Amino acid sequence: MYKKSTILQLTVFICFGLVAKISHAQASDEEQIRQFYKLSLLEGQSYQWLDALSNDIGSRLSGSLGAEKAVAWGKDELDSLGLDKVWLQPVMVPKWIRGVPEYAYLETSAGHSTNVPICALGGSVATAPGGVKAEVIEVHALDELKELGREKIEGKIVFYNRPMQADLINTFEAYGGCVDQRYNGAREAAGYGAVGVIVRSMNLRQDDYPHAGAMSYGDLPNTQRIPAAAISTNGADLLSNTLKLNKQSKFFFKMSCKNLADVQSYNVIGEITGSQYPNRFMVVGGHLDSWDLGDGSHDDGAGIVQSMEVLRLIKKAGYRPRHSIRVVLFMNEENGLRGGTEYAEIASSKGEDHVFGLESDSGGFSPRGFTLDIDDANFEKVQGWAPLFKPYMIHYFEKGESGADIGPLKKDGIVLAGLRPDSQRYFDYHHAANDTFDAVNKRELELGAAAMTSLMYLFDKYGVSQ
Amino acid sequence: MYKKSTILQLTVFICFGLVAKISHAQASDEEQIRQFYKLSLLEGQSYQWLDALSNDIGSRLSGSLGAEKAVAWGKDELDSLGLDKVWLQPVMVPKWIRGVPEYAYLETSAGHSTNVPICALGGSVATAPGGVKAEVIEVHALDELKELGREKIEGKIVFYNRPMQADLINTFEAYGGCVDQRYNGAREAAGYGAVGVIVRSMNLRQDDYPHAGAMSYGDLPNTQRIPAAAISTNGADLLSNTLKLNKQSKFFFKMSCKNLADVQSYNVIGEITGSQYPNRFMVVGGHLDSWDLGDGSHDDGAGIVQSMEVLRLIKKAGYRPRHSIRVVLFMNEENGLRGGTEYAEIASSKGEDHVFGLESDSGGFSPRGFTLDIDDANFEKVQGWAPLFKPYMIHYFEKGESGADIGPLKKDGIVLAGLRPDSQRYFDYHHAANDTFDAVNKRELELGAAAMTSLMYLFDKYGVSQ
């Protein structure tokens, strides 16, 4: 039996040791994260990469020359990082082309017309070669069509004009509340005999940019498909106000877009093989394809270069990951999700054990935190890391969706996370001609890359609880 | 003596009542704040006001015609809000004019020169009518001058080239670490016989905009004052690189700026008189003056229109404040702080009891929270309000400085607060020609106004603990 004083000493010793160990672990996490931030902000590569991707290559719609160039560029850049493996993963992608730029006008009365900015929605069929000209019927929701009935719709252009709800703080929520008009509007309207569809752009700002984006005809036969275009928010207001004055006003639009056969493309993948769990995979990625109007700097050039930067920073910092960490530059998020689907299918067929996925596909704006598709035990762990992020103004850790490309990896035992940048400006640029390099701030981009690297580091170091 | 069950019932009753009361108070605060946000985002006035202030009036340097117009505009707009009182508070302000636009070039070798973008610092004297041309000595800190000594400095232009520290997350901290070069650089260099001073712009971005800002000669006699200008970050790098190749490279600059006699100007003040404590004042404000290069949309047009919006939203929401709430459009923050000083002096001489001050002077970017100059008891109260702000992504409540204009109100028993928007882009625009209306996002501006209104409401409702 020990003397009291010995027990006390022992207790003090154990406690001191424990505290010292915790302090050391914390200090070390703090130092490691500080190093990632310093490297990203002082010697970062993400902004130069974005410059190349946006300005040297430009837009990268699936199946386009731009997308092909981006694949080659991505592979070259990953090759230059000294990763353990870099490869291309073949994936067939849809090919839709815009053709000759679209053209539209609004005829306010016979002989009086004004041009309005539109763009074909991705996947739309062309108009007749001479264009479509018809009266317009304005609606604010898909189910209004049923009330109106075929009688009031047949032979007309349906104009979906429900705006994004401006009092929602999260602009993605406002987007989610409108995007049915763009995605399903043409399919619905065709069923009532409409000859075309015009959709108010998903944009919270008043301006002259039409915003592209995917639409679908579902299983509608080719013969029943009608052309669908987005109109700028200013254009939508003009059209709506004109209809209030004259219901008989006619709208003309002409588009030569078309769907071609699928073509070969690739996901671009790089890997640092894990030191302890080489067969457990952690993935970070964004999508390499973009719409064709701007150069896709926010959507999703930012996510691509941030994801590449995660692996570069890990190497640069001399951190040796325990798990295998992959960067995946996914192809075809915008109009098919073929890359994300293919990656998950191959991972599954090879029995690769994926335990963590992280995506950046919400723009290169000032990062606020992460949403996580996660169970309670792991979520508690993440919340315990919040103090490590506080000095970097990363405060938002909430359960929620992660990202479209990593979504297909979802299964028990995987944590999926999405970077959440400030969302206020995102839909000013989303899918529009002004989504260009100058709209991205260097520091905001770099802060996002550092936040992602820090989260990846913590999941690698402390593991995902199964 | 009560029976156990009675005591239990009583306890349950009291507890239930307490919970119900708290829930009701919370629900009501939540609802009130939600209403402020809805009004700001759906029926806001701040953005239209900024449009007028930036695009109709433009730059508003103290003593300029723009500043005079802005005073008249501010009074008119406050008059239109149906406040209880609106008045102008006279204040004499310094008048410095830029004169003919500046001009500078760098002579790399005899006969070879290149123009570089500069701007006179506010308060600087002119160069000789024909300009100044001299060799350049580059330094990174004021105390390097002492090491170099008069011998190496006399007859030369001192070039202060210490950049903002990019790995600091809070860009205001990086600014604070550099601004001594701009403010005191000329005074120091004059003491060693320098003939002029060129200062690297306080900008974290590489671009061609020189950034203005105040400088001081202290008590240096007029005859010893030397001209001082800012150079763009690209220009600074060019100059530094050129000096590395050829130490004898000469720099030329020509400026005709001058200090004139003080002129009459005004703070613009509006008040809603308190229902319960009409003699306790809560102030919200920003500064109406700006530098002369852009139109001062971020600095501090945003703060002006947000502060006006606070009172408009309070009235619009039908909230009847208990304290008297004033909006103050302060004059002359940039080069003198005369408005803030005068306001505090008059308040003190009249024995007006100011208990809360709130300033917005950090740009119209997405709001993150507030810094507070506050005692522990009141700080604890503010921290208790944090959950009310969470749905609006307002997470940052820290002790710190509030704002320059309300600073002179500091005394025991007053809480001073400053809105803290995201700081990453602020110094891209600060005091430069690109601080213009298009750099402000409507929603971000409106979210700031709503956050400010919410904090004002909470302090009004729950009071400042003395």
Image: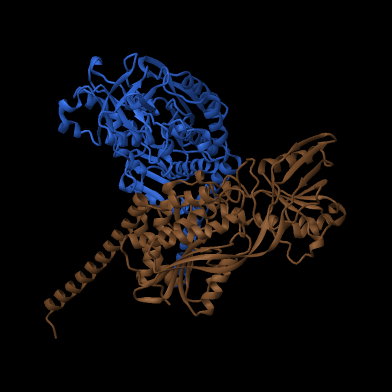
Chain colours: A blue, B brown
Q: Residue furthest right?
A: B151
Q: How many marks?
A: 0
How far from the left and from the top, in percent, is residue B388? 34, 59
Q: Is residue A191 left or right of residue B105?
A: left
Describe residue A292's horizontal placement relative to residue B62 as left or right.
left
In the depicted structure, whether residue A20 falls above or below residue A328: below
Task: Tell me the quarter of the image containing the N terminus of chain B.
Answer: bottom left
Which quadrant holds residue B407? Answer: bottom right
Viewer-nearest residue: B32 or A331: B32
For the residue pair A401 and A114, the one nearer the viewer reads as A114
Residue under the image location 18 percent in, 24 percent down: A192
Instruction: Residue at 30% x, 63% y: name it.
Output: B318
Residue A466 in sight from this viewpoint: no
x%, y% of residue A133?
30, 21
The C terminus of chain B, quarter of image: bottom left
Regarding residue A135, the answer to whether it shows in the image is: yes
Name the spot of residue B297 as percent of width and height, x first: 52, 50
Towards the viewer: A32 or B198: B198
Q: Quadrant of residue B11?
A: bottom left
Looking at the image, residue A429 sits to the left or right of residue B23; the answer is right
Instruction: Where is residue A337? Give x, y as percent.
Output: 35, 26
